[in-house]
Amino acid sequence: MKNTIVIIDALSTGNELAAAFMSRGCDVVHIWQDFSRQTRTQGFVETINYAGSLDDLIQQLRLYDIRYVIAGADSGIALADMLASAMGIPAANDPETTDWRRNKYISQQKLAEKGIRSIRQCKASSAAELVSWAELNGYPVIVKPLNSGASDGVTLCESGEDVQRAAEQLLGKENLLGYVNDELLIQELIDGTQYFVNTLSWHGQHYVTDIWEQVRSRVSGGAYNFEGMHLIDAQETYARALADYTLEVLSALGVDYGAAHNEVILTAEGPVLIETNARLMGASINDVTFSACLGYTQVSLCAAMYLAPQDFIDRYVGTHYRMHAYVSEISFLFKRDGVLEAMPGKRAIERLPSFSNFFALPRPGQRVTRTADTKGLPGFAYLLHQDQSQLTRDFNQILAWQQRDDIYRIVDE
Ligand SMILES: Nc1ncnc2c1ncn2[C@@H]1O[C@H](COP(=O)(O)OP(=O)(O)O)[C@@H](O)[C@H]1O
Ligand SMILES: [Mg+2]
């Protein structure tokens, strides 16, 4: 029997990870916690619907020689930690500390305890308590669920009324990941440019695979829209600062094994963690473009690391990645609700000198809603070029077209 990899909730880039293991000759068993969903990747040796009993699950997996248990998405993290531990698989994160990574309040508390820069915050189960914290600490503040994802419920508030409204909308409601928001988190607003610092870890040794500068815009009544990102040079001083801080964070939060997608804001005083997600970067990792630039993607290097950990440590740990070209990603937005009729901006984008490829473009005829979070994003474009100024020009051109609403044509139903 071949070595078998278990992936829990192969959503988003978790699909790509499953495919990467399969292409390296591994059998992959998929465990679904939300069986109403579909995976893009085919070819799992088995798909198991998890009904809540760990013992039953272990029984079902007896058939296989399981080498690793890996979360394919946020929803799979807690079960992956628990299952790996129950099966005696050492290359996994400690289930005793899952909350350090999954609960945003506890993550910040752990950083504070360990003397690592963190966010001033409070959690509460009533609107009144949230408002009184904000009145004492000042505005603006962020109100958000403790454990959701895809920007669900993240609200920027400038006043007590804003906090009150956000609390009324969110408290007691089920969030995107299926947890009820019994409490909400309120935090000082961290000001600065946001970066995604993607990492891989093995036995507590970490490597930064890629760092992206995020381009985001304010959404009225919500928080931010994600419009795109630029891969930054790991040799730059600020990149080093982001990397050093993130590696400290990973150790503090018990990310010993596997991928992490860390959101870090660079403030005037230095980097501050927004959250660590102990899984791959979500939404899109584009093999063609990213590999042309880095020689790998977080997905391909993750699969390679699990299959040959010593090679990963020897070759990558302690080094900084090198870029062979500049890369940017544009994440399109739907500007309104309606039916998608066409993509009139497509041709012009394809003609830009740095255009590389599109990914996950929506199909004409489908109903769409104005983009206000990062779930079900309306497609991506990738730019790749040796000349950074060309890439920046093309990126800004696409954003200008998006601003003028020239990319998608959406009509009333
Ligand atoms: N305290 C904060 N200060 C500044 N920006 C924040 C803060 N909390 C969240 N954000 C912004 O909102 C986005 C979504 O919040 P996050 O906690 O990452 O939620 P999710 O788990 O839904 O991704 C972040 O990527 C960041 O841009
Ligand atoms: Mg986030």
Image: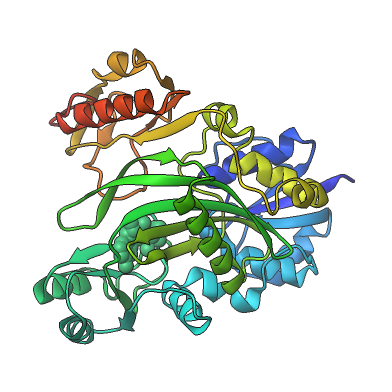
Residue at (68, 38) in percent of width and height: 20
Q: Residue 152: in sight, yes or no?
A: no
Q: Give x and y (percent) for residue 231.
A: 46, 39
Horizontal relation, residue 135 to residue 334: left or right: left
Residue at (61, 69) in percent of width and height: 251
Horizontal relation, residue 91 to residue 380: left or right: right
Q: Quadrant of residue 167?
A: bottom left
Residue furthest to the front in view is 237
Q: Quadrant of residue 356?
A: top left
Q: Give x and y (percent) for residue 294.
A: 59, 34
Q: Quadrant of residue 131?
A: bottom left
| Front-lying residue, 380 or 355 | 355
Q: Residue 346: in sight, yes or no?
A: yes
Quadrant in the picture for the C terminus: top left
Residue at (39, 72) in percent of width and height: 146
Residue at (49, 58) in percent of width and height: 241
